[in-house]
Amino acid sequence: MKSFEAKHIVKKFEGVVALSNGNIHIDGPKICGLVGANGSGKTTFARICAGLIKRDQGQVFIDGKQAEINSPMDAKKHGIVLVHQNLSLIPELSVWENINLGHEKRSKKIFFDNRFARDNAKKILDDLSPEAISIHEKVGNLTPSQMQVVEIVKALSQNPRLLILDEPTAALEYFQVEKLFKKIQALKKQNVFIVFISHRLWEVTELCDLVYVFRNGQTAGSLDFSKQPREEKLIVPLFLGSEKTFTAQKKKKKDFSKADTTLALNNISFEDKLKGINLEAKKGEIIGLGGLNGQGQEELLLLIAGVLRPTGGKVHLGGKLVRFKHPNEAIGSGIFLVPGDRQRDGLFLSHSVFENIIYPKFSHKKEGFLIKQSKLQQQTNDIIDQVSLSPPNTNLLVENLSGGNQQKVVFGRWLQFESRILLLNDPAKGIDIQAKSDLYRLVNDLAQGGTTVILYASSNEELISNCDRVITMFEGKFVEEICNEEICDEKLIKSSLRVG
């Protein structure tokens, strides 16, 4: 492959325009960044290039010749492979089976060559991942970051000529991102074209040779880093359509000493994941959970939400001892969770925005048995306005929304209730600057109204901007509390790494 070009790509879903004029042009093996707000058409564009959905209009050219890509098989013939943002793995199959699925090698053209498949999977996996992931382990037993590594390895095993990576780093640890970047650079030297979709602008400026910006379904502009500085400030105006940026501005200091205690955890433990957790959360307070990923933050949120039961210690809600046996009991008490995996735990993908937003109504104890359809429709419309859903269509299937807009649906469904405690598990993961700003504006509004917020975020910027205090976690324990003006990137990093 010497060049790849997509011109005037158009795609509509049930009359809603996802892409109205998508264009990119890559000459020579390069790493091309693709950025834009949620709903701007990035993932739709990637899926069209990979043959997963058919474009309504437009052309694709490979080496100057028009290419018909109307199916995954068409894309495969041209060597185009997509690493999905929403993983395409099968949890019940092993790592090596997932990696080779769909492009198995046969011995004597009859039987699958399983020995080759296992050896090939292990070779590529060991090259990309410095951590030990057994090729025989079932994918369903892996951590989210390990699953993402397997998804990338699955794509690499197909020897792509054009590799499209859709938000590949959102679930990865820092050391995994570093290894991936080295692999991408190596692929470029092997004449592989790369399209790298990311909401993290620092990744794009560090890794890519050029960047295309999508806005409202159109190509808004491009930058060539061989001719222009690698600076985020040049991307942001095209990205947002304005000069707005999301910066880590610290919250104003508040005094919660006289505020009511909403939640108290006393010496809480859960298996080997949580060890002796003590916490008093005040009404209207935003408490951050810091630390490296996988230090018990998710388990703590799930325990408060009633998904997990503590193996030791006591939970008090409003001064009363509670022992939730089911998440419904926590929801009935005004404790709401925005989960870390919106696809797996937060949404009914094949159902509409309306259905996803209203379904908690029917199990909430404060709601009557019969609820008027017109009332539900009005409440759904109000929530769509509050979260700035794009497109604002209650009948659109959630699976056709961008990742950020899916997250808005997960978050927005709780706005119709009076929340006592809001639990957020990395809520801005995989969403763009504007969606992030919208989400945290709503979070702070809820806190102003008296909701206690407990937030885990993999981004220190989000903790600095929004939290009244941050408690860092390490191996299931609270290790340090950082308050108000003391919350800064340096302290959070040192605390997470247990240095200084």
Image: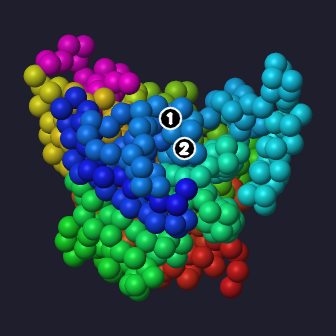
Quadrant (top left, top right, bottom left, bottom right) of the C terminus? bottom right
Quadrant (top left, top right, bottom left, bottom right) of the N terminus? bottom right
Q: Is residue 52 visible?
A: no
Residue 49, quarter of the rendered image: top left
At x 75%, y 37%, the residue is 95
Vertical side of 209 occupied by 37: above or below:
above
Which is nearer the eye, 400 or 54? 54
Tag 2 secondary structure: loop
Q: Amino acid at mark 2?
A: His
At x 32%, y 79%, the residue is 234
Residue 223, quarter of the rendered image: bottom left
Q: Is residue 29 visible?
A: yes
Q: Pointer 1: residues within 10 angstroms few (<14), some, or many (20+)?
A: some
Gap between marks 2 and 1, in whole Å? 7 Å
Vertical side of 355 occupied by 447: above or below:
below
The number of numbered badges drawn on the structure is: 2
Residue 451 screen position, x and y as percent: 32, 52
Residue 63 screen position, x and y as percent: 47, 55
The extreme right residue here reads: 115
Magenta residue span: 350-373
At x 55%, y 83%, the residue is 490
The extreme front residue here reads: 65
Vertical side of 204 occupied by 96: above or below:
above
Name the residue that disc number 1 marks: 74
Tag 1 secondary structure: helix
**Residue 363 part of the magenta-drawn span:** yes
Which disc number belongs to residue 78?
2
Q: Amino acid at mark 1?
A: Asp
Which is nearer the eye, 26 or 222? 26
Residue 396 screen position, x and y as percent: 25, 30
Left or right side of 395 for 55: right
